[in-house]
Amino acid sequence: MNLPDLNEARKRTSKEILIKTNDYIVKENLKDLGQGKKYYVKTYGCQMNVHDSENIKAILEDMSFEEVDNLEDADLILLNTCAIRENAHNKVFGFLGRVKHLKESKPHIICGICGCMAQEENVVKEIKNKYKWVDIVFGTHNIYNLPNILFDSMTKKEQEIEVFSIEGDVLENIPVKRDSKYKAWVNIMYGCDKFCTYCIVPYTRGKQRSRTPEYIINEVKDLVKEGYQEVTLLGQNVNAYGKDLGIDYKMGDLLRDVAKTGIPRIRFMTSHPWDFDDDMINAIKEYDNIMPYIHLPLQSGSDKILKLMGRRYTKEKYLDLYHKLKEIPDVAITTDIIVGFPGETEEDFNDTLDVVKECEYDSAFTFIFSPREGTPAAKMQDNISKEEKEERLYKLNELVNEFANKNNQKYLHKVVKVLIEGIGEKGNLFGYTDTMKLVNVDGSEDNIGKIVDVEITDIKTWSLDGKVVK
Ligand code: 5AD
Ligand code: SF4
């Protein structure tokens, strides 16, 4: 048993980051462990987690488990969890109730918890004490060892907990079962060293460690050969890519090299304003296959709150960068904003509204501050009432929606490129523009998996309607 340890998770040392190419092994006797058994993976949280689930699925299939879409049909249920806010926690514990119920009638079901919540000391204590029926808990650094963790749990019939709270290495031989045939997630770095005072990620995901350019570029080249149309380069803070590699190679260099593979579309997320350098902006301008879409979290428009958040920029610096990015032709910019951070006054909140008014974002993810145990902000005095926070969120959302709609209006009757991903709920095609706008499209199914010209015929706040013109 290896339990998570918050103090260990906090540590950052000068330990060398190892690139490991042999850690994932499925022993001969485990290759059939899942024969005749079905698995169901439920994923919460960000794209990093979505991609981890793609790794987990491939590992399970290496052990002969078969995927099912229906929870009720599964012999193995894994919850890949998110720790970013309290409501992410609540959702997981709610879902666990359903699994417990199923397990009462089918005791052979194996239930596992992984992802960011598994890295939290208190969550794991609670699972160990109050959720003894949960069979396995494994952390974000332990995915490669899933075959052995599962085997131990199945043979010993006791709760297996394997969570390392380490800074972490880079593992290169983990298999992947991609959800899409057209767009792929590609990790370029793991972890985060920014330690914004509200955020749990530096504790759950470890030290910042970049993959080497060769591995990333080879992965993209393989995706091109397989016919993929789009890659999203993933990291908690992609702009800081390469800083830990000790070579003179940064995000701008990586973007150019990935662009040269010829993959039709490149996206990247998430950016932190601090590391967004001019070279990166130039790379985006130079290559048509680097999409003009940037997610640039603001978090707050008040210098006082930004300082308390440990964001390392001021409102002025953020706006300078924003205006530089706006020079990228037809760029769309989205953001993340937190309201109700401890100490946020009406005036601070108005500063945030002012930035939103100036930036006229294409869209924004908005959140009420949620204290995460172990982070510095959780100890700050929070004297804003729940009603006040909700009111601020409401006001902010009204403004965000106004600009989202205004930005979408610019698309009416224009012809834009859309990568058609599949058939939506209403029976029509759907896909995304270069600028990441969701479009519901009239057209034939032959267009699925292709980038096609679409004329925009109608505008909604959160999506566009259109028809294929070519
Ligand atoms: N409370 C509220 N929102 C948070 N985020 C991160 N941590 C917290 C927290 N403790 C938001 C930030 C981040 C996004 C992924 O989630 O806005 O950019
Ligand atoms: Fe992703 Fe962060 Fe949530 Fe973990 S806590 S799943 S890294 S958003």
Image (tube, rainbow, N blue to C red):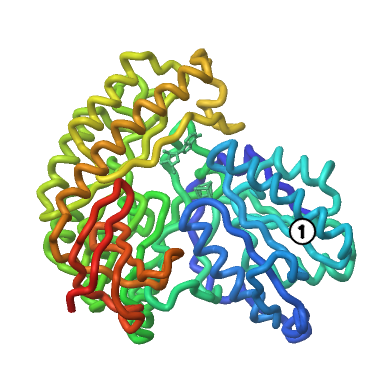
Q: Assign a secondary structure to mark 1.
A: strand
Q: Nearer the viewer, residue 458 or 405?
A: 458
Instruction: Classify mark 1: residues with Cα within 10 Å, few (<14), some (14-19) or many (20+).
Output: many
Q: Position of residue 81 (x, y in %)?
A: 61, 52
Residue 184 appears in which quarter of the rendering? bottom left
Q: Nearer the viewer, residue 37 or 376?
A: 37
Quarter that holds the N terminus: bottom right
Q: Position of residue 363 (x, y in %)?
A: 30, 44
Q: Is residue 51 rendered to the left or right of residue 75?
A: left
Q: Is residue 444 above or below residue 199?
A: below
- Residue 128 can be seen, yes or no: yes
Q: Position of residue 325 (x, y in %)?
A: 16, 47
Q: Is residue 445 above or below residue 209?
A: below
Q: Is residue 395 above or below residue 186?
A: above
**Residue at horizontal 35%, vertical 14%?**
346
**Residue at horizontal 23%, vertical 25%?**
354
Label 1 sits on residue: 136
Q: Is residue 39 rendered to the left or right of residue 300?
A: right
Q: Nearer the viewer, residue 333 or 192?
A: 333
Q: Position of residue 72 (x, y in %)?
A: 74, 66
Residue 273 appears in which quarter of the rendering? top left
- How many circles with numbers are drawn on the protein? 1
**Residue at horizontal 55%, vertical 76%?**
175
- Residue 257 can be seen, yes or no: no
Q: Amino acid at mark 1?
A: Ile
**Residue at horizontal 20%, vertical 60%?**
457
Quarter that holds the C terminus: bottom left
Residue 428 appears in which quarter of the rendering? bottom left
Q: Is residue 210 above or below residue 352?
A: below
